[in-house]
Amino acid sequence: MQTSIRNQISGKVLEIVEDKVLTEVVMETAAGKIAAVITTRSAREMSLQVGDTVAAIIKATNVSIGK
């Protein structure tokens, strides 16, 4: 996969929580766990499964920080 986006984090899928419209994907990275919400359609098109190696591509305007 090639992108021009520099904000990428690689990791492995730990958990997938799917409903009709949205799917939460939890991944383990070198920095810890992160979660992303994508459409269920996208998750199915990518055939995401626990254990898959994935890359989170982060758009800076969509990042939320919590403590």
Image (cartoon, helix red, strand yellow):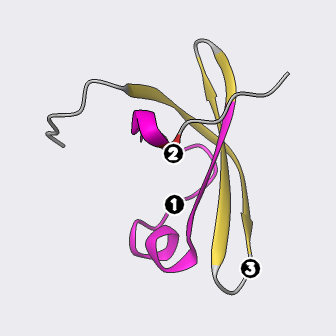
Label 1: state its secondary structure.
loop
Q: How many marks?
A: 3
Front of the two marks 3 and 1:
3
Q: Label 1 is placed on what type of residue?
A: Leu
The residue shown at (26%, 24%) is 6
- 10 Å neighbourhood of mark 3: few (<14), some, or many (≥20)? few
Q: Label 2 is placed on what type of residue?
A: Asp
Tags 3 and 1 touching, CB below 8 Å: no
**Mark 2 and mark 1: Cα distance apart in space:** 7 Å
Residue tagged by mark 3?
Answer: 19
- 10 Å neighbourhood of mark 1: few (<14), some, or many (≥20)? some
Tags 2 and 1 touching, CB below 8 Å: yes
Task: Name the quadrant of the N terminus.
Answer: top left
In x, y percent, where is residue 9? Answer: 44, 26
**Mark 3 and mark 2: Cα distance apart in space:** 20 Å
In x, y percent, where is residue 53? Answer: 46, 38
**Mark 3 and mark 1: Cα distance apart in space:** 14 Å
